[in-house]
Amino acid sequence: MRISTRGSYALEAVMAIALHPDEQTINIREISERTQISDNYLEQIFSLLRKNKVISSSRGAYGGYQLARPAGQIMVGDVLRATEKSISPVMCVEENSACGKSAGCVTKTAWKKLYGAISDTVDAISIADLVRDFNQKTTRESIDYSI
Amino acid sequence: MDSRGPDFSLCKGENYMKLSTKCRYGLRALVDLAVFSDRGHVALHEIAQRQEISLKYLEQDFSVLRRAGIVKSVKGAQGGYLLTKSPSEIRLSEIVSVLEGDLLLIEIDDPEQTDIRLFLTQNVWTRLNQNVSKSLHSICLSDLVDDYKMQQSGEGMYYI
């Protein structure tokens, strides 16, 4: 029961894009420097994120990546769902491919509760929340440092 | 750079976030054991039959559960298994951590931290791991037994 490397790296890359100043795209080399994730790996992650409309890209000399919608409208759950096959701990709580016994299945109730805890957590945190907290933390640390 | 390297094709790959079959079957078998052991130990082949799980599979699961002290075996020709504690004293967090190895959705052990990775570890991944543990800790085996008994008293076919 693990979030894949792909999923955690995707969130790091989305953060790198979101932390970039407004109205500007960021290219893959800059994202790679910031996150220490290889260009190659990033490109594979980005193809999933683009397909799921989390990020968009523009071509040309000043081309690069940006968020596909405002950071407040992108949840951590959106990033993970774009890159994980599924974020549910068992098949039957998310998809309709139940096992045929699911109507009266008592373990399903427990797994449903677990899935609820996972999805509630990742759907409660937006990229805008993370950017705000990140910037507050960075500001706090630089003040502490100067004193 | 990325030490783990690209490990996937362009399509979404493995279902990493799924619980193992071992864990899903193990929990079903434990609910069965809890329901049917009120009059003494239960043979694994009976659980296997009722739950339609292969006996071989259950034997592996129960040897892990026995070593972890969740079940104990009764030897002999009419042998079987018993829970070591009341179902109300066994939480799902204990069962899942034994059968899955741990309760973590994400391992936090990367020594090469970037500022973003460190921040996400502290603000997202730790919280997610904690909420998974909390959720599983809040459910006792007896809750599932109660659900099962309640369904039994109702209509239709019910399963563990």
Image (tube, coloured by chain):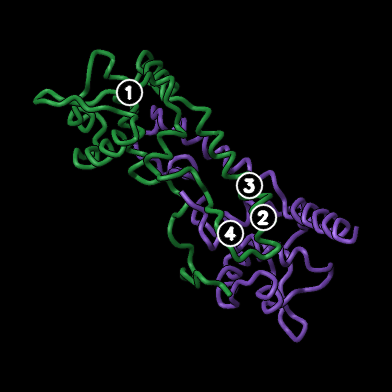
Residue type at mark 2 is Leu
Mark 4 to mark 1: distance in Å? Answer: 39 Å
Which quarter of the rendering shows the C terminus of chain B? top left
Specify the subunit that label 2 lies on: B
Residue that label 1 marks? B84
Residue that label 3 marks? A122
The structure residue drawn at horizontal position 61% and vertical position 63%, both measured from the top left corner, is A10
Mark 2 to mark 4: distance in Å? Answer: 9 Å
Specify the subunit that label 4 lies on: A
**Residue that protrudes farthest toward the bottom in the picture:** A61
At label 1, counting other C-alpha atoms closer than 10 Å, the crowd grade (few under 14, some 14-19, many 20 or more) is some
Picture quadrant of residue A100:
top left
Residue type at mark 1 is Thr
Callouts 3 and 1 on one subunit: no
Above/below status of A58 relative to A97 = below
Image position, residue A7 (x, y; %): 56, 59
Residue type at mark 3 is Val
Secondary element type, mark 3: helix
Q: Which chain is purple?
A: A
Q: Nearer the viewer, mark 2 or mark 1?
A: 1
The structure residue drawn at horizontal position 63% and vertical position 42%, both measured from the top left corner, is A121
Residue that label 4 marks? A8
Image position, residue B77 (x, y; %): 9, 25
Image position, residue B104 (x, y; %): 51, 46
Image position, residue B46 (x, y; %): 19, 27
Residue that label 2 marks? B120
Picture quadrant of residue A54:
bottom right
